[in-house]
Amino acid sequence: MLEVLVTVVILAVGLLGLSALQSRLQVAEMESYQRAQALMLLDDMVSRITVNRAQATQYVTATDEPLGVGHQCRIDASGPLHERDQCEWSTLLQGAAELSGANKVGAMLGGRGCVESLGNQEYLITVAWQAMTPSSASLASLSCGQNLYDGGANSTCTNDRCRRAVSTIVRIGTLS
């Protein structure tokens, strides 16, 4: 009887360990999905700027007012290409590529994007989003979406510890 009780306790501890592992795997899967979505959206804006290189300066956004979540725009078919590109990218950052009912679920949580001019025909493109767990690393060098990802009271997401971001530099060459 004692052996059966010990076996049940060992089995219970093992099953609890498996359930904890499963929940951590789900968080890791969501984090990798969000990073993949961010990289695709980053590449999308790189392509848009590269195609419309003559108007590259028009794509620059304010880092304290990023495109994406919280940004409202309307697409005007007769408007300039850079305005349409920014509006389309903003709606993609909000998740418009995939719907679940009326909810936009096709991108990262809290997706935001910025285009900054570095001078000399160089542009820093950044996509930021809300992570599932806090990180110890700081993203102070990237200002896009800074201080927009702090959680509420009793949250572990303070001091931008849940903000994730990817960025790249686009260099526009002078063609003659």
Image: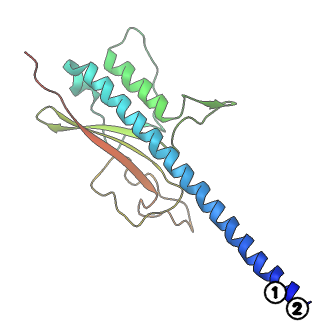
Which residue is nearer to you in this view: 51 or 61? 51
Examine the rendered structure and indicate whether residue 115 appears above or below residue 144.
Answer: above
The Cα atoms of the two marked residues, 1 and 2, are separated by: 6 Å
Which residue is nearer to you in this view: 168 or 152? 168
Q: Outermost residue, left direction? A: 176
Is there CB contact under 8 Å for labels 1 and 2? yes
Looking at the rendered image, the quarter that the C terminus falls into is: top left
Q: Outermost residue, top direction? A: 78
Helix, strand or loop at label 2? It is helix
On residue 159, the disc is none
Residue 118: quadrant of the picture: top left
Examine the rendered structure and indicate whether residue 130 appears above or below residue 171.
Answer: below
Helix, strand or loop at label 1? It is helix
Dot 1 amino acid type: Val
At which x and y percent is residue 136? 40, 67
Q: Does 77 sit left or right of 31 as displayed?
A: left
Q: Residue at x 54, y 28 (%)?
A: 97
Dot 2 amino acid type: Leu
On residue 2, the disc is 2
Q: Residue at x 38, y 38 (%)?
A: 113
- Name the residue beneath numbered marker 1: 6
Q: Outermost residue, bottom direction? A: 2
Q: How many marks?
A: 2
Which residue is nearer to you in this view: 4 or 18? 4
Q: What colour scheme was applied to this rendering of the protein?
A: rainbow
At which x and y percent is residue 3? 85, 88
Q: Outermost residue, right direction? A: 1
At which x and y percent is residue 108? 51, 42
Examine the rendered structure and indicate whether residue 60 appears above or below residue 136.
Answer: above
